[in-house]
Image: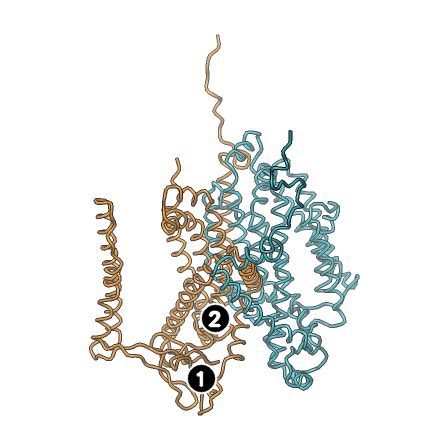
Amino acid sequence: MATMSDAPSESFRLSMLLNDKRYRAYTFQFIALLLLIGFFSYLGVNLVRNLQAAGLNISFGFLGDPAGYDINQRLIEYSKDSTHWRASVVGVLNTLLVAVVGCFFATIIGVVVGVLRLSNNWIVSRLMSVYVEIFRNVPVLIWILIIMAIFIAVLPQPRDFRGANAEASMFLDLFAFTGRGFYMPKPYFAAEWAAGATGWLIVIALLILGFIGSRMIAGNATKIQEATGNRPTTWYWTLGIWFGPLIIAFFVMGLSWDVPALKGFNFQGGIYARNSFIALTFALSIYTAAFIAENVRAGILSVSKGQSEAAASLGLRPNRIMNLVILPQALRVIIPPLISHFLNLTKNSSLAIAVGYMDLTGTLGGITLNQTGRAIESVLLLMAFYLTISLSISAIMNVYNKSISLKER
Amino acid sequence: MSNSDNIVFVRTEMLPELPPPATETGVIKWLRENLFSSVTNSILTLISLYIIYQLLSGFLPWLFGGVWTTSSLKECREVLDGATGGCFSVLTERWNQLLFGFKYPPDQYWRIALAFVLLLIAIAPVLFQKLPRKLMYFTGLFPFIGFWLIWGGTLMTPIVILVGIIAGYIAFTRLEHNSFAMGAAGGILTAAVIIWLGGFVTGSMSGFLALEQVPSRDLGGFMLNLILGVVCVSLSLPIGIALALGRQSDMLIIKWICVVFIEFIRGVPLITLLFVANVVLAYFLPPGTNFDLILRVIIMITMFSSAYIAEVIRGGLAALPKGQYEAADSLGLDYAQSMQLIILPQALKISIPGIVNVAVGLFKDTTLVSVISMFDLVGMIRGPILASTEWNGVYWELWGFAVLLFFVVCYSISKYSQWLEQQLRTDHR
C-alpha cells in the first residue's frame, strides 16, 4: 500500500545561497548593496581627504554673502549688494520666464506646423517638412548661437533710430526692435491706490472670477438644454462676464502705457527684453516646435478616419466632431510627449550660458560658482532645482495619464 | 427590312476617344488639386511661394557669388567689392581646424581620416544584415585600432587589452555552464589579471609600432563630436540594457538603485553633468589622480545616454506579451538564457527607433562640451576662428558649415532608422 509523504525537508546548506533560486536573489541584493555602500564610502573618503587637503568644507553659508556682481536682466529687485541666494532666485525666475514663454510659442508654432504638414496643399506641406527636418537634425546650441548672431547683425542699433532721417524707425511708434533687444510699451496704473502690485492683483482676481462665472453660465446652459432640449445663446453673457469688470477696472485704475522713447544713445522706459533673452527664447521655441509638430501630426493621424465618419453619420456638426470625437482621442496621444518636450525645453534653457543670459546656470552655476569656488554646493543646488521641476511635472503627468488611460476590462 | 432612309442621321462609325479637358489632366489638374483647391489653399500657396522666393533670392547669390581663395575677411570683402557673396575662403583656409581642432599635428591627419574610413567599414555589418557576418570580427577589432590611430602610442597597449578581453571571454564560456554569474565573475577576473600582467610587457616594448602620441586635450573640431558620439553611444547600449533589466527586476534593492539612477539622470540637464565632469568629479577621486577631461566627459555623457536608452529599452520590454516570458520559463531556461535567447532579441527590435532617436539626440548634445571650454566644432567656431583677427565677423559661412555637417549626419541616421523599421516589420506585409 502506497503512503503519501511530504517531500523530504531539505536542511539549509550554504551552497543554496548561490544555486537555489529562492535564496540567490538575497545573495545578489546583498552583494549589490555592499558594492554600492563601498562605492559611496570610497567617494566620501576621497571627498573628505580632498577637502582637507584644500582646506575647504561643505557649507551653504556662502549663499548669505553679498554677490558683488550685476545681473542685467531681472524680474525682481536685485543689486550688487544682494546675496548670492538672491542672485540664484533671480536666476530661477529668469529660467522659468524663458521656459514659460518658450513653451507658449513652441506650442503655437508646433501645432500650426503640425496641422499644415498634413495639409493637402503640396507646397505648404513640403515647406513644413523641410522646416521640421532642418531644425530637428541640427543641435539646439548651434541654433541659439546662429539666431543670436542674426539678431546682432541684422537688426538696427539704437543709434540708427536717431535724427530726422533715421535709418530705422519704431514699429507703430510703440515697439522698437534693436540689436540690443526689444523695447515694448509697459502698462501701468495711474491711480495711486492701484499703483504697483495691487492693481495687477485686482486684475488677476477679476480674471479668476471671470473664469468661474463663465463656467457657471455654461453649466446653467447645459442644465437648460437637458431639461428643454434647446441650448440658450450665451456667448454675449460669457463675453460680458470676462471683459466687463476688467474694462471697468482698467478705467477706474487709470490704465496707461509707458512707451519707450529714444533718450541719448538708448531707449528709455517701457519693457526691455534683452537680445540674449529674445534669441534664446526664439531659438528654443522654433527648435522645440519642430518636435511638437511631429507629435501633433502623429496624434491627428492616430485617430482613424472611421471615427469622424461615424460621428458624421450620427449627425454631429463638424465643430462638434472635432471637439467631442477627434480632439479627445488625438490629445491622448499628443499630450504625454508634449509635456516631455516642455521638460526638454526647460532643461535646454540652461544653454542660456552660451549667449550670456543670466538664468540659474548663469548665476549660480556660472558667476557664483567661479567667485566663491563652491563647486560642489553650487552644482548640487543646480541639480536639485532642475530635478524638482522634472520630478514634479512627471508626477503630475502620471496622475494625468492614469486619468485618461482607456478603461478596459 | 431596313428603313434607314427615314431616319435623319445615324452614326455608323465609332468616334475616336477625345483627350480629357485640359483642366483635368497633367500639370494643370495637379496644380488645381494640390495648390489651388480652395481660396485658403491658394493664399497659402502664394505665401509659401513668396517665402521660398525670398529665401532663395537671398541664399543663391550668396552661395554662388562666394569667394573661396582669400586669406582674411578684409581681403575677401575687397574682392567682393560690395557684391553679394559668401566668404567661403574661411572654410578653405580653416577646414583642418574645423574638422580636427587646432592642436592635432597636421602631418598626422591621415590617421584620423583612416580611422574614420575604418569606422564606416566597422559599422557597416552592424547596420546592414546582408553584409557577410565575418566582417563582425573587424567590428570587434575596430575599437583597438581606432584608439591606436587617434591617440597614438605603441600598438602593444591595445593588443594587451584585446588579449585580456579574449582570455576573459574564453574563461566566461568555460564557466558559463555552471551559472551565468560565475562565468561573468571568472571572465572579468581573468581579463583583469592578463591586462595587469600585460602592463609589464607594454612597459618594456614601448617602441613597438609606435605612432606619435597625441594627448586627448589636443583633439577637437568635428572629430571630437564624432568620437564622443560614437564612443558614448556604443558604451551606453550595454549599460542601458543592464539598467532596463535591473529596473524590471524583482529584487527590490537592485530595482531601486536603477530607478533612482535613471530618474536622477533624466531629471537634470546634460550641462550640469558636464559641470560635474569639469569641476566636481576631481573632488571624488583619490588625491593626486588626474585623468583627463575628455575621459571624465565620456563617463558623464555615457551615464546620461544610458539612462535614456534604458527607458527606451524598458518600453520595448514592456511591449512584449507576457506569454513570451512564460514560454521561456516553461522551456526551463534560466534568467540569463531566457533574456539572451528570447526576450532581448525581440525587445531590442522594438526599441530600435527609440535607440536611434536617443543616439541622434546624443550626437547633437555633444556640442555642449564647448560650454566647458572644449574645442569641438562649435567651440572651434566660437573660440579660435571667430576670435582671430582674420576671420572676426564671418558668421553665416561658419555656422552654415556646422549646420550642414550635423544635418547630413543626423538626417542620414534617421533615414536609416526608418529604412530599418521597414526591414524589420515581420508582421503583415
Q: Amino acid at mark 1?
A: Ser
For mark 1, give the secondary structure: loop
Kindly identify which residue carries mark 1. Answer: A169
Q: Is residue B300 visible?
A: no
| 2 and 1 marks in contact (CB < 8 Å) | no
For mark 2, give the secondary structure: helix
Name the chain letter of the residue that bears numbered label 1: A
Q: B387 above or below B221?
A: below
Left or right: residue B97 versus residue A219 is: right
Residue beneath the point at 40% across and 81% down: A68
Q: Position of residue A352 (x, y in %)?
A: 48, 71
Q: CA distance from mark 2 to mark 1?
A: 25 Å
Q: Classify 10 Å Cα crowding around label 1: few (below 14), some (14-19), many (20 and above).
A: some
Q: Amino acid at mark 2?
A: Leu
Nearest the viewer among B219 and B172 is B219
Query: Chain B appears what colour?
Result: cyan
Tell which circle, 2 or 1, labels the residue nearer the N-terminal end: 1
Task: Same chain for labels 2 and 1? Say yes or no.
Answer: yes
Query: Chain A appears what colour?
Result: orange
Kindly identify which residue carries mark 2. Answer: A280
Q: Is residue A133 visible?
A: yes
Q: Total marks drawn? A: 2
Nearest the viewer among B233 and A344 is A344
Q: B195 above or below B332?
A: below
Nearest the viewer among A157 and A115 is A115
Name the chain letter of the residue that bears numbered label 2: A
